[in-house]
Structures are given as C-alpha cells and as structure tokens.
Image (spheres, grey):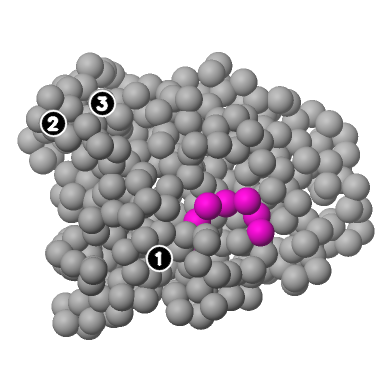
C-alpha cells in the first residue's frame, strides 16, 4: 500500500509517520536566517533557496516516484510530502524548506475536482457560468487538507531553527485560469474572453477564490509555515488595464486577510513575466517582490524603492553554464541585492534537467559570499 506509514527511500533514509526529532542538535535559539531576512532585519549573510527545489532534478525524488506514482499521492500523503520537502534541504543546505505541494491542492475543499497528470499537468472540467461559480464552497482546510497541517508540523520538527519553513498559495487570477481553461494554457484566450464577455462571472469566481485562498494560507501559517509565498504566475499575461481589474484587487484581498490574521508573517509575491509589473506588485501589500530574471535588481530598486524586500533572481538556465559563469552571475546579483531585505533565489523554478552538482554549487556560492560591511 503506497499510503502506508513507513516509507523507504533510496538514500538509505527510513521515514516513519513519527519523524525523528533533530532540533536537539540545534542550540541556537535565534529565528532562522531566511525568516529574519524576510522581516527586513540585518543578517549575517544572504539566505538562499530555489523555487521548485523539491522535485524531478533530484534522483531521490525520481526514485520515490517509482513508489508513489501520482503527483497527488506524493503531495497529499504527509509522509511523502515531508520526505520530498526535506530532500533539497538535506542535499544542499538551503535556508528555506518549502512544502512540497501544488497551488491546486485546496480545490477539492471548495468542491472543485482536478487531477495532475505526469506529462500533461493539471486537468479539470471547465468553469465558466454563474451557476457553476455559485457551487464553489467555502473551504474548511482543517477538514479538507489535514495532510498539509501534518506535513508542516513534521517539517518544523525536522529542521528546527536551521531553516525557514515556507508555505505557498496560488492567487485568484492564476487559479481561475486553470478553472476556466480546464487546465494549463499558453494563450489564456478563454479566461480573457470570459472577462470581456461576462465579467460578473469572473469577478464572482475571483472573489470566492480570494476568501478561500486567504483561509488556506492562514491555515498553513497556523500549521507551522513561517513565510508564505503567493503565486500569481499567469497574471503576467494580462495587459496593465486588465491586470488592475482582474488580478490586483484579488491579490490585495488575499494578502490583506493574511496580514490581518498574522501581521508578523512575511509574504513574498511572485509573478512570471513580471518585469512590467514591479510597481504594481510592490503595491500588493506583500513584504517581498520576487523578481524573474528579465529585470535587474538595480532597476527593480530604482522602480520600487528600498523599503520593500527583493527575492531572486538568477536565470534558472544559468545553472547549465560552467561554474565560473554561475559564480560570476550569482555574485553580481548578491552585490546588487545587498545584505538586507534580499533573499537569493532563481528567477523561476529550477529546471528539471538541472544537475544536482550545479544546484549545490549555486547554493554553496551564495552561502560562502560575505557581504561587505
């Protein structure tokens, strides 16, 4: 049975449902580095993690896929989700340990069915009428996603203060793209058309999603997440006018509700193809803007100022370059980011074909860089 309580993985680690407690090895009572940096505190070095750091680029993950064959099985079983989340932290010593999950995971708790196929990605029925939108339920994540709380508790126990545990959610417009398009899309024609032809339906959908996603993010925090990253990945495909109508208000609604419940928890916002949107992202209420690789940190600081934090932003494909190129580009970004209000990351998720050696070289380069006084 794939959902048993004992998982054997190929790196000779046996993970039971009662995870070993490793906090005893950590005598430092300070909050973890990334959390302090995300709060804007002065830190001893720049923290680093990688979006999509847990996944197919790692052999231990690919080996586990042979046992737990579907994405939902891997992400909705707390033992599997914990083990996969820990794999890059163990291998690379990342300063962030992000929960292995998916932005669509809360959907069933709203009455929205979906699946994630290994090659095709998310698939679901299309939602495009008011009658359908009215059927979206208010989520009770304690009942619909108890595995998330268990995984967070496991991760906090495992990493102690040696890393920051991150949660994440998808923002309303991006989630709506999957609902309206019935899965992934390249052109986003159907959701854009719905916004033009029947905006009331789309706004009603976005509004319900915003309340649910805020509840889900708060649940993650109350389960152990120390930082939340919010993804509006596909909002970068909107024109500025449409972004201001269909994306920005619902980003702010989610972030405002999270901040009202937990003002102490830093929030990072990420949008793919966001070079034109930096000022809007900075107005979302998030504490940190995560840059893609198409804009420099110097330009970003000129445009959004120094009061808001920055995450990123090495091009993930740079990890296919010779080590000296990786080192040079990484250090250039670190110098531009400075030692305060900067979390080092890639400009997008790590590519599945990236070698583990290159990923580790990137992490080690960041960790060994000493900021000037």
Tell me if label 3 and label 2 are in contact, CB under 8 Å: no
Labelled disc at residue 27: 2
Can residue 89 be seen at all in this image of the molecule? yes
Residue at 16% across / 78% down in the picture?
323
Q: Residue 160 location, x and y as percent?
A: 23, 32
Residue linked to disc 1: 312
Residue located at (47% from left, 20% from top): 146
335 relative position to 366: left or right = right
Q: Earlier in the sequence, mark 3 or mark 2?
A: 2
The residue closer to the viewer here, 72 or 331, is 331
- Label 3 neighbour load within 10 Å: few <14, some 14-19, many 20+: some
Query: In this view, which residue lies farthest toward the front?
Result: 373
User: Which mark identifies residue 157?
Assistant: 3
What is the distance, in whole Å, between disc 2 and disc 1 at their CAs?
30 Å
Magenta stretch containing residue 273, yes or no?
Answer: no
- Chain-order first, disc 2 or disc 1: 2
Q: CA distance from mark 3 to mark 2?
A: 14 Å
What segment carries the magenta color? 283-290
Q: Residue at x 78, y 56 (%)?
A: 246
Q: CA distance from mark 1 to mark 3?
A: 27 Å
Closer to the camera, 365 or 63? Answer: 365
Question: Does 165 sit left or right of 15 as displayed?
Answer: right
* Contact, mark 1 vs mark 3 (Cβ under 8 Å): no
Q: Tell me where residue 308 appears, x and y as whole percent.
A: 52, 60
Classify 133 as above or below 33: above
Quarter-wise, where is residue 43 in the image?
Answer: bottom left
* Most common SS among magenta residues: loop
| Image: 31 above or below 348 | above
């Amino acid at each position: 049975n794939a959902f048993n309580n004992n998982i054997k993985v190929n790196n000779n680690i046996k993970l039971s449902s009662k995870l070993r407690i490793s906090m005893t090895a950590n005598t430092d009572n300070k909050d973890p580095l990334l959390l302090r940096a995300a709060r804007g505190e002065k830190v001893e070095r720049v923290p680093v993690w990688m979006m999509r750091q847990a996944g197919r680029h790692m052999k231990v993950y690919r080996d586990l896929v042979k046992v737990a064959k579907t994405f939902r099985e891997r992400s909705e079983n707390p033992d599997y989700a914990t083990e996969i989340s820990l794999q890059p932290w163990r291998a690379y010593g990342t300063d962030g340990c992000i929960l292995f999950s998916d932005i669509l995971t809360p959907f069933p708790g709203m009455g929205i069915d979906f699946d994630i196929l290994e090659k095709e990605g998310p698939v679901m029925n299309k939602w495009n009428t008011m009658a359908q939108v009215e059927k979206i339920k208010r989520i009770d994540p304690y009942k619909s996603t108890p595995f998330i709380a268990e995984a967070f508790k496991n991760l906090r126990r495992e990493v102690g203060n040696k890393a920051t545990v991150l949660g994440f959610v998808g923002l309303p417009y991006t989630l709506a793209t999957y609902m309206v398009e019935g899965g992934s899309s390249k052109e986003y024609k159907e959701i854009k058309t719905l916004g033009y032809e029947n905006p009331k339906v789309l706004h009603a959908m976005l509004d319900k999603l915003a309340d649910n996603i805020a509840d889900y993010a708060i649940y993650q925090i109350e389960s152990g997440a120390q930082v939340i990253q919010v993804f509006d990945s596909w909002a970068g495909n909107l024109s500025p006018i449409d972004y201001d109508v269909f994306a920005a208000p619902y980003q702010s609604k989610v972030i405002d509700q999270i901040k009202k419940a937990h003002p102490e928890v830093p929030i990072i916002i990420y949008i793919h193809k966001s070079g034109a949107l930096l000022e809007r992202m900075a107005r979302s209420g998030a504490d940190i803007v995560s840059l893609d690789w198409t804009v420099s940190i110097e330009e970003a600081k000129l445009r959004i100022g120094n009061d808001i934090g920055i995450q990123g932003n090495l091009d993930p494909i740079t990890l296919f370059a010779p080590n000296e190129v990786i080192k040079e580009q990484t250090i250039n970004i670190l110098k531009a980011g400075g030692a305060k209000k900067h979390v080092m990351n890639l400009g997008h998720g790590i590519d599945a074909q990236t070698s583990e050696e290159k990923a580790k070289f990137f992490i080690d380069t960041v960790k060994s860089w000493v900021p000037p006084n």
